[in-house]
Image (cartoon, rainbow, N blue to C red):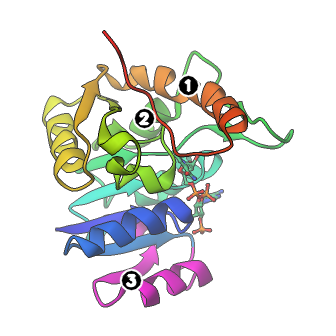
C-alpha cells in the first residue's frame, strides 16, 4: 500500500520504518518537505521511503497515521484535509501539555479529546484512535511485552474503518487482542489514561508495559 505517516518524530519514524519493512511505500509528512530529521529517516529507510509536506503525504497515502505532536495535530491535519478525504486516519497522538514540566497535563480536559478534534478537523475522513496508550516501539511490535498477551484499545465512528485497523494491528504489528470501545468520543478514555501511563512510567522505570483487561 501507499501510506502517509504524518510526523517526523520518534513515533513517525518507528511506524514508518515498520511499514517500509513490511513492503509498503511510505511518505512521511512534515511542515517542511526538507525537514532534517525527515530526510535522515528517508535515507535510513530506503527507496520506499519519501518525505513531503503534510499535504503531499496525505495525497500520496491510501491510509494515514497521525503521529504529530498533540498541540500541533489539528493544524497538521487541517493542512492535510483535502488529501485525507475518504481515507482511514489512524490517530496515535496524545493531547499532552508539557509547558509546566513533568508530568504533563491533558490540554483537552475531560469533555473533549484529541481524537474528536481530529475527526472534526477531518469531517470526510474516518478517524480511528489507536496505539496512543503504548510506547512507540510497542505500537508496531506488540510481542515485545508478555509475548503480546495484552490489549489494544481502539475507537472511531466508522465500523469498516475499525475493522481495517484491527486487521492492521493484528496482521502487521502483532497484536492479539483489540478491544473496540465505540465511537470516537471514547478517545476521552484512552487519552485520559495517559495521566496514569506517565505515573506508571515513573514508578516502573520503563515504557515497556501495557494494559491487559481481566474479566
Ligand atoms: N513517544 C511515544 O512513545 C508515544 C507513544 C504514544 C503516543 N505518542 C504520541 O505520538 C505523537 C508523536 O510523538 P513524537 O514524540 O514522535 O513526536 P512529536 O515531537 O510529539 O511531534 C513531532 C511532529 O509534530 C509536528 N508538529 C509539532 N508542532 C506542530 C505544529 N504547531 N503544527 C503542525 N505540526 C506540528 C512536527 O512537525 P515538523 O515535522 O514540521 O517538525 C513533527 O512532525 C504525539 O502526539 C505523542 O503524544 C507518543
| Magenta-drawn segment | 32-58
- What residue would you read off at disc 2? 120
Q: Earlier in the sequence, mark 3 or mark 1?
A: 3
Q: Any mark on residue 193, and which?
A: 1
Q: Any mark on residue 8, and which?
A: none
Nearer to us: label 2 or label 1: 1
In depth, the one of 89 and 37 nearer the eye is 37
Q: Is residue 121 above or below residue 203?
A: below
Place of residue 126 in the rendered image (x, y in percent of width and height, measured from the top left): 27, 40
Which structural element holds mark 2? helix
Place of residue 143 in the rendered image (x, y in percent of width and height, measured from the top left): 32, 49
Query: Residue reaching furthest front?
Result: 146
Identify the residue at horizontal 58%, vertical 45% (top origin): 207
* Dot 3 beta carbon under 8 Å from ligand 1: no
* Dot 1 beta carbon under 8 Å from ligand 1: no
Q: Is residue 135 above or below residue 133?
A: below
- What residue would you read off at disc 3? 45
Nearer to us: label 2 or label 3: 3
**Marks 2 and 1: CB-CB under 8 Å?**
no
103 horizontally vs 78: left or right: right
Place of residue 113 in the rendered image (x, y in percent of width and height, measured from the top left): 52, 28
Amino acid at each position: 500500500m501507499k501510506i502517509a505517516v504524518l510526523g517526523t518524530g520518534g513515533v513517525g519514524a518507528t511506524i514508518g520504518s515498520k511499514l517500509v519493512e513490511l513492503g509498503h511505500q511510505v511518505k512521511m509528512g512534515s511542515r517542511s518537505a526538507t525537514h532534517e530529521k525527515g530526510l535522515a529517516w528517508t535515507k535510513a529507510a530506503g527507496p520506499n521511503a519519501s518525505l513531503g509536506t503534510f499535504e503531499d503525504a496525505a495525497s500520496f497515502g491510501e491510509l494515514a497515521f497521525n503521529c504529530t505532536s498533540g498541540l500541533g495535530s489539528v493544524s497538521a491535519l487541517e493542512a492535510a484535509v483535502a488529501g485525507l478525504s475518504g481515507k482511514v486516519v489512524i490517530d496515535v497522538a496524545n493531547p499532552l501539555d508539557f509547558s509546566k514540566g513533568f508530568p504533563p497535563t491533558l490540554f483537552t480536559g475531560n469533555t473533549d479529546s484529541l481524537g474528536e478534534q481530529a475527526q472534526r478537523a477531518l469531517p470526510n475522513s474516518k478517524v480511528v484512535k489507536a496505539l496512543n496508550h503504548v510506547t512507540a516501539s510497542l505500537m508496531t511490535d506488540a510481542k515485545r511485552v508478555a509475548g503480546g498477551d495484552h490489549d489494544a484499545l481502539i475507537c472511531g465512528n466508522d465500523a469498516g474503518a475499525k475493522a481495517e485497523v484491527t486487521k492492521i494491528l493484528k496482521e502487521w504489528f502483532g497484536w492479539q487482542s483489540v478491544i473496540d470501545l465505540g465511537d470516537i468520543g471514547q478517545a476521552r478514555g484512552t487519552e485520559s489514561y495517559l495521566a496514569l501511563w506517565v505515573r506508571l512510567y515513573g514508578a516502573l522505570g520503563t515504557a515497556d508495559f501495557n494494559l491487559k483487561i481481566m474479566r
